Image: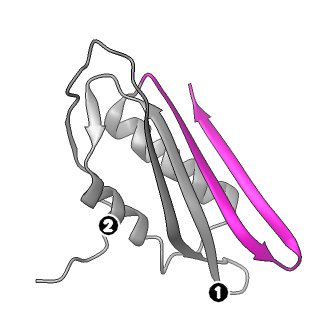
Amino acid sequence: MPSQPTKQLEWFPSPRPGREFEIRFECPEFTCLCPKTGQPDFATIRIRYTPAERCVELKSLKLYLWSYRDQGAFHEAVTNQILDDLVALLSPRKMVVEGDFMVRGGIHTVVEASYP
């Protein structure tokens, strides 16, 4: 059965909850829709976090990011929503989500949202 996009994120226990370490993801195939034109917006989403008790499961993260493909969202809103959803799931020590969006109308947009 092929995978389907979903907003359902999953986690697993951190292998070293007492140690500070950083996890980084780069997702170069992120797509959402411009809420004004309906045209696709392409971006690289970068996620950096220091886990506490939980780590995000990668397949669920992939399917979660895929779920934005047919959703209209401003760059600022989608970057902050990804951060909010991951923080709610993981309660990390710290996290940064960066949306590095491709040039549209001659403007290159990078949005960085952080926690705490």
Give x and y (percent) for residue 80.
59, 48
Q: Quadrant of the C terminus?
A: top right
Q: How much space separates mark 1 and mark 2, taking CA atoms?
A: 21 Å
Give x and y (percent) for residue 24.
45, 42
For image coordinates 26% across by 31% down, the residue present is 54
Q: Quadrant of residue 112?
A: top right
State whether the magenta stretch is mostly helix, strand or loop.
strand
User: In this rendering, would 53 be left or right of 98?
Assistant: left
Report crowding for label 2: few under 14, some 14 to 19, many 20 or more residues within 10 A (C-alpha): some
Question: As drawn, which residue projects farthest toward the top?
Answer: 18
User: In this rendering, would 75 be left or right of 11?
Assistant: right
Label 1: which residue? 38
Q: Quadrant of residue 52?
A: top left
Q: Are marks 1 and 2 in contact (CB under 8 Å)?
A: no
In depth, the one of 19 and 9 nearer the eye is 19
Q: In the image, which residues are magenta?
A: 93-116
For image coordinates 70% across by 51% down, the residue present is 111
User: In this rendering, would 105 be left or right of 12?
Assistant: right
Which three-letter amino acid code belongs to the residue tagged 1?
Answer: Gly
At numbered mark 1, what does the secondary structure look like: helix, strand or loop?
A: loop
Residue 101 position (above or below residue 18) = below
For image coordinates 62% across by 75% down, the residue present is 42
Give x and y (percent) for residue 76.
68, 55
Eye-nearest disc, 1 or 2 = 2
In depth, the one of 70 and 58 nearer the eye is 58
Magenta-colored stretch includes residue 106: yes
Which three-letter amino acid code belongs to the residue tagged 2?
Answer: Leu
Question: As drawn, which residue projects farthest toward the right?
Answer: 106
Residue 63 bears which disc, if any? 2
